[in-house]
Amino acid sequence: MAAPAPDHDRPHVEIDRVSMAFDDRPVVDRLTCSFPRGRVTVILGGSGSGKTTLLRLLAGLIRPTEGRILIDGTDVAGLPESALAPVRAKIGMLFQGGALLDSLTVGDNLALPLRERTRLSEARIDEIVTGRLDAVGLDHRVARLLPGQLSGGMLRRVALARAILLDPQILLCDEPFSGLDPISVKRIELLLSRLNRHHGMTIVIVSHHIASTVRLADRVLLLLPGRAVEGAPGELRENADREISGFFDEDLDESLEPREVATRIEPLDDSPRDAGSARG
Ligand SMILES: Nc1ncnc2c1ncn2[C@@H]1O[C@H](COP(=O)(O)OP(=O)(O)O)[C@@H](O)[C@H]1O
Ligand SMILES: [Mg+2]
């Protein structure tokens, strides 16, 4: 028998002929794919192609109608609810809505899961909260603010801090770039890349953001009607099959955005300006 492959050569998560139906309507149909350990995989696909459903299956939030979901070799789809806790502890999830409670401060939002699920002292919880804020590039004073007082980009970073709170090995992100300005997109991108490189986190991202996908992804899983395709981003982009490479045409490349925005700025008047009289 061959010696077991070293850990980093084995997939961290495997999906084996998984189907998921809602009210008899198949959303995922006998999908087989894998997510390599310590790598970034981006899931691309049209609206309604089952991307969020797939993340929820991976997180163990819903059970497949059929098939196996192996995390570190353990089939979680077959585990009883009582045995799922240690598996869920390995997984962090950045939800589409951010999942922050508006009535609690950022600090209390972050402390909540630690207070509920651990027996850590308040002093230690405080330390962890500050540490996670720091990890996403936010000052510790942000802990005292309410979510409503933060910008969209900061909120997304707090949501990311919450997703990595319990030090997960696997991080699932549902559209982490949606609705953000280009600078915030880059910042989230950098943070995800850092979590992957410095902490070896296995990261799975659902995204429509092609520019980020090309920059971040080691692997891409493309969900097309009736089939799924896996490959390196460059490989899929150059694919002779237009249904595959066509996905990369819809490039929302930032280089286009400033130009578009610039054409919409109308001068207020056409009188000449000089620095001295500009503002009174
Ligand atoms: N809990 C649910 N109950 C019924 N239908 C659902 C449920 N979750 C998702 N669906 C349906 O499954 C399909 C795929 O949804 P989703 O995974 O959210 O797609 P995506 O994230 O790719 O846009 C959609 O048609 C959606 O309406
Ligand atoms: Mg979705």
Image (cartoon, rainbow, N blue to C red):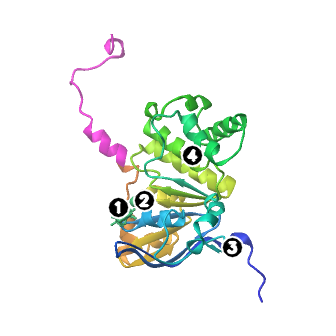
Do the residues under discs 3 and 4 have CB atoms within 8 angstroms? no
Q: CA distance from mark 2 to mark 1?
A: 7 Å
Residue 269: percent from the left, percent from the top? 21, 24
Q: Which quadrant of the figure contains the N terminus? A: bottom right
Q: Amino acid at mark 1?
A: Glu
Q: Residue furthest bottom?
A: 1
Instruction: Mark 2 and ligand 1: say if the CB distance to the nearest ligand atom is below 8 Å.
Output: no
Q: Amino acid at mark 4?
A: Arg
Looking at marks 1 and 3 on the same chain, the residue that comes earlier in the sequence is marked by 3
SS of the residue under disc 4: helix
Tag 3 residue: 9
Asked if the magenta segment contains residue 275, the reply would be yes
* The disc label shown at residue 184, or none: none
Q: Nearer the viewer, residue 30 or 176?
A: 30
- Crowd band around label 3 with a 10 angstrom C-alpha radius: few (<14), some (14–19), many (20+): few
- Crowd band around label 4 with a 10 angstrom C-alpha radius: few (<14), some (14–19), many (20+): many
Residue 130: percent from the left, percent from the top? 65, 36
Question: Which residue is found at the position 73% from the left and 77% from the top?
Answer: 5
Q: CA distance from mark 2 to mark 4?
A: 25 Å
Looking at marks 3 and 2 on the same chain, the residue that comes earlier in the sequence is marked by 3
Specify whether 38 is left or right of 258.
right
Question: Which residue is found at the position 39% from the left and 65% from the top?
Answer: 248
Tag 2 residue: 210
